[in-house]
Amino acid sequence: MPPRKLFRLKLRSRTLLLGERTLIMGVLNVTPDSFSDGGKLFSLKRAVDGARIMERAGADILDIGAESTRPGSAGISAAEELQRLLPVLEALRTRLKIPISVDTQKAGVAEIAFGAGAAMLNDISGLKNDPRMAKVAAKFGIPLILMYMRGTPRTMQKQPFAKSVLKDVIAGLRHSLAIARRAGVRRSQIILDPGIGFGKSFRQNYELLARLPELANLGYPLLVGTSRKGFLGKTLASHGKPAPPEARIWGTAATVTASILGGAHIVRVHDVAEMAQVAKVTDALLYALSLRTEQL
């Protein structure tokens, strides 16, 4: 098993080394209809408290999302997204030491969020929703996470799935990369996310996890988010009912391990304390495997 390639990601105030160990991205949803927590953090105090708990638990990055992207969701206006997002950003910019990423598909929201303290952009549409996002990232020189989603949150689990999920994901990511590079985003500032759960079938999510090394061959750092997702709920179903999100932690742990062994540099999770332990142990295993490979 080859070791992960090392990358340096430049932020405004620091440089993150990717690959030496797995970085933990904690998920902070400030929406009333989050699939993972049912909107538990949809208040300023709860959001701030939740963010600080994640930092203490071992998060290296905090990813804030103010628009639900659960299957079937219709989206909200930029004004409403900013109304939810900005108070949290402004409250956290002096309270957190870790960098903040903003999960948005809108260039206008991204630009304002960057002015309010965000250090990274996470676009689940891979620049399909608003190609101007790439120009914002290029203008400020900030890291840009490009995810591949087949369709939109409203349609992604209703339209036909790809015949070959790996080919579909690679083609989609290459399309996003082309948009980003044409806009002037530096190669060194791009992270790729295959989009586990976004427009993929139950089996295709597992196939992507098994074939992550092939995505690593694209030459960019990888972010993988499997945390509490629906395919885990189906796998862990009991008496014909999917396991609820809060009962998917052990299943998430298994997929986080698989992601790291497959080459992920960053894992995006809800249960930071637990997954920080998983990542630490898996990193130790990955290191041992790399030493064994060198000796052969």
Image (cartoon, helix red, strand yellow):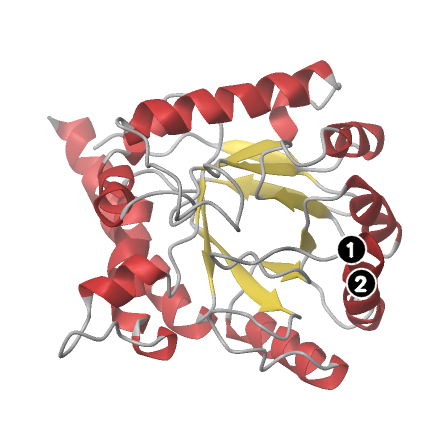
184 or 3: which is nearer to us?
A: 184
Res 15 quadrant in image: top right
Dot 2: what SS? helix
Q: Is residue 203 left or right of residue 104?
A: left
Across and down, in percent, residue 23 comes to: 49, 52
Residue denoted by label 1 = 77
Q: Residue at x 66, y 55 (%)?
A: 75
User: Can residue 219 be seen?
Assistant: no
- The answer to which quarter of the image holds residue 12 is top right
Q: Is residue 167 above or below residue 63?
A: above
In this rendering, the count of numbered labels is: 2
Q: Is residue 185 visible?
A: yes
Q: Which amino acid is tagged 1?
A: Ser
For label 1, the crowd category at 10 Å Cα-Cα, with few meaning under 14, some 14 to 19 and many 20 or more, is few
User: Residue at 72% of width from left, 42% of height from top?
Assistant: 11
- In terms of secondary structure, where does tag 1 sit? loop
Residue 133, quarter of the rendered image: top right
Q: Nearer the viewer, residue 89 or 260?
A: 89
Query: 156 or 223, which lies in front?
Result: 156
What is the x, y in percent for residue 182? 70, 14
**Above or below — where is 157 with respect to 233?**
above
Q: CA distance from mark 1 to mark 2?
A: 5 Å
In which quadrant is the C terminus drawn? top left
Verify CB contact (< 8 Å) between mark 1 and mark 2. yes
Q: Quadrant of the N terminus?
A: top left
The circle on residue 80 is 2
Q: Residue at x 24, y 60 (%)?
A: 254
Percent across and percent down for residue 136 are 81, 34
Mark 2 surroundings: few (<14), some (14-19) or many (≥20) residues within 10 A: few
Please report the residue visible at 74 percent of the width from the left and 48 percent of the height from the top: 119
**Residue 45, labelled with which disc?**
none
